[in-house]
């Protein structure tokens, strides 16, 4: 029961987190396209700030809390063996990568907010695939549990 409830809450937090991670760079693109229109960029700036503060940061914290809860429940149920299995190590690598990506996006927002250059539209269109690729790897790691 506890495990399934934590799993549900973990997946819901991850959905909200991923939505933010995938949407923020889209707003960056609109922001870059309209960089010379102060009235328009002030709206994008507010959207970016709200998305980070109200959705992405809380969702990341919740995903971490429920994810760590799942690690604890797994540990109680099956011992420490899974901690060194390939699927779990892959998941850990994914967690580091996606949390790092979140950090990169928030640092980028601060730069944009100060009026600094954050790269081209094309760059953001391409790198916006990064979190989705990481997510695919993470979901396959936990569902297939390869190397278990
Ligand atoms: C932020 C830190 C995270 C931690 C500490 C964490 C940890 C965990 C753990 C321990 C499990 C249970 C694995 C099992 O016993 O089978 C789990 C399940 C899951 N995680 Fe995460 N995770 C995190 C982030 C993410 C992210 C970013 C994604 C997707 C992009 C994700 C997707 C999933 C899914 C879909 C499941 C459910 C798998 C299933 O049982 O069917 N997690 N997570």
Image (cartoon, rainbow, N blue to C red):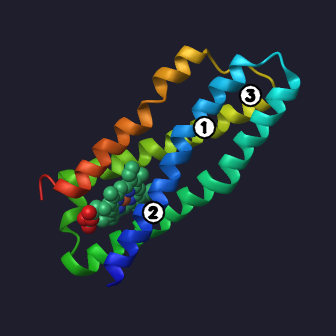
Residue 125: give x, y in percent of width and height. Answer: 51, 22
Q: What label does residue 12 carry, if any?
A: 2
Residue 22: give x, y in percent of width and height. Answer: 51, 39
Residue 109: give x, y in percent of width and height. Answer: 69, 34
Point out the quarter of the image occupied by ligand 1: bottom left
- Quote the CA–CA distance across marks 2 and 3: 29 Å
Depicted 145 relative to depicted 51: above or below: below
Residue 102: give x, y in percent of width and height. Answer: 55, 43
Task: Decide which of tag 2 and tag 3 comes sooner along the chain.
Answer: 2
Disc 2 element = helix
Quarter location, residue 97: top left
Q: Which residue is mark 3?
A: 112
Q: Quadrant of the C terminus?
A: bottom left
Looking at the image, which residue is at 81% across and 27% down?
40
In the foreground, 89 or 50:
50
Q: What label does residue 24 carry, if any?
A: 1
134 relative position to 147: left or right: right
- Quote the CA–CA distance across marks 2 and 1: 19 Å
**Residue 49 in view in this figure:** yes
Disc 3 element = helix
Depicted 96 relative to depicted 76: above or below: above
Point out the residue furthest to the bottom here.
Answer: 1
Q: Quadrant of the N terminus?
A: bottom left
Badge nearest the viewer, 2 or 3? 2
Quarter location, residue 71: bottom left
């Amino acid at each position: 029961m506890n495990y399934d409830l934590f799993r549900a809450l973990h997946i819901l937090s991850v959905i909200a987190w991923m939505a933010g991670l995938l949407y923020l760079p889209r707003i960056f693109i609109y922001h870059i396209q309209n960089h010379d229109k102060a009235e328009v960029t002030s709206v994008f700036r507010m959207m970016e700030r709200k998305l980070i503060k109200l959705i992405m940061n809380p969702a990341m914290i919740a995903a971490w809390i429920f994810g760590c809860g799942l690690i604890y429940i797994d540990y109680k149920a099956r011992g420490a063996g899974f901690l060194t299995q390939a699927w779990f190590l892959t998941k850990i690598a994914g967690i580091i990568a996606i949390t790092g990506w979140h950090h990169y996006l928030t640092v980028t927002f601060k730069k944009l907010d100060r009026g600094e250059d954050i790269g081209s539209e094309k760059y953001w269109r391409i790198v916006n695939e990064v979190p989705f690729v990481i997510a695919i790897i993470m979901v396959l790691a936990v569902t297939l549990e390869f190397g278990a």
